[in-house]
Image (spheres, rainbow, N blue to C red):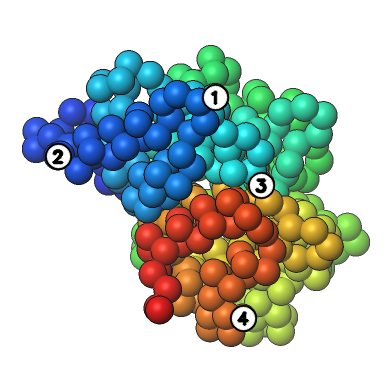
Amino acid sequence: MPIPLYPEMVMRQDLSPDHGFGPEIDDCCQQIHDATKGWGANKQKVVDALAKHNATDRYKLYIRYKELHKQDLEELMKKEFSGNFGLALRFLALPLHKAECKMIRKATAGVGANVNIVWSVLVGRTNEELELLKKTYYDMYSKDLGKVLASELTGNMEVLVFSALQGGQDPFDPQHHTKEKAIEDAEEIYQKGQGKWGTEERGIFKILTKSLKEHLQAIDRAYSEKYGYTLAKAMAKELNGNLADATVHLIEMKLKPYEAMANLIKTACKGIGTDELLLTCTLIRLQEVMGDVMAAHIELYGKTVHDRVRSEVKGNFRDLLLHVLDTAWPEQG
């Protein structure tokens, strides 16, 4: 199955654990409260309280801050801070499933959706996390996520995202997912893609989204042996632009998830000008698995994600993202 991103406490929706949240969480809530009292907030104290904690502790902070101070933590960040720095703090102030809903909401606000945010959040996720995400989006905004995306996306990107959003990955069944079935699916992908004039994306996306890792590995092997390309290379060759990026991401999130996540960070930084929203969302979303992502990034690109952040963004925003990274992979020295 795909790599889960949500902490166990988020998946349990544990609002009041028997063991309590502990004095450290209360102290952090008080630190945030004191840092935002009066005229002008103390940015560093807020960063220390939010960015230096993992997603589980930030889930606790979100709940406990409202209990102690009768104020929504994300709304407080919105009131006190602005720009990319403020937006990152707003995401950090939310439990991860709510933060992802806020990211999608931000990406679909105004004219034209930021499709890179949409597909990077929704493609290659577990069935359970997608179900929680859809429920949470409705709870937060009283709107069906599918209907929102249908109004924002077009063409084959809409087809791919909806294939992912529906979940429904087939449990691996060795009686059904045989070598012969993998060869059959590989042939179908070829006939709907490289083997015909024009690509029939809907059929390809259905196979890719429904297949769990074990079966997709077998399809990839069969495809490579017969046609000389991996599935990822075939899709990159057959498709274009954002659609190619999203489809390759889907495949690699199942076959090589940490490399896929490292590639996503690079995607946010490629070309002229950094996609700062994509970079922010990606680093916060992946914090729970950033240790493995960092190792993959170093292996692929010969540098840390810290190095990439320093070269792409500046000021308080840069320092905040570096703190997020340090929580998972502290820099030496």
Distance of label 1 from label 4 (alpha carbons): 38 Å
Indicate the amino acid at tag 1: Lys
Q: Position of residue 72 (x, y in %)?
A: 41, 22
Q: Which residue is mark 4?
A: 301
* N-terminal label among 1 and 3: 1
The reply to whether dot 3 and dot 4 touch (C-beta < 8 Å) is no
- Give residue 244's quadrant in the image: bottom right
Indicate left or right for 261 with 129 as reference: right
Q: Amino acid at mark 4?
A: Tyr
23 sits to left or right of 99? left
- Mark in the foreground, 1 or 3: 1
Q: Nearer the viewer, mark 1 or mark 4?
A: 1
- Please indicate, yes or no, whether residue 20 appears anywhere in the rendered image: yes
Judge whether residue 1 can be spotted in this image: no
Residue where numbered disc 3 is placed? 277
Q: Is residue 254 left or right of residue 237?
A: left
At x 77% / y 45%, what residue is drawn? 156
Q: Is 273 drawn above or below residue 25 in the view shown? A: below
Rendered position, 308 above or below 31:
below
Q: Position of residue 127 (x, y in %)?
A: 43, 44
Which residue is labeled 1 in the image? Answer: 79
Disc on the earlier residue, 2 or 1: 2
Nearest to N terminus: mark 1 or mark 4: 1
Asked if disc 2 and disc 1 are in contact, CB closer than 8 Å, the reply is no
Residue situated in front as seen by the camera: 186 or 320 = 320
Mark 3: amino acid:
Leu
2 vs 4, front mark: 2
In-front residue for pair 40/292: 40
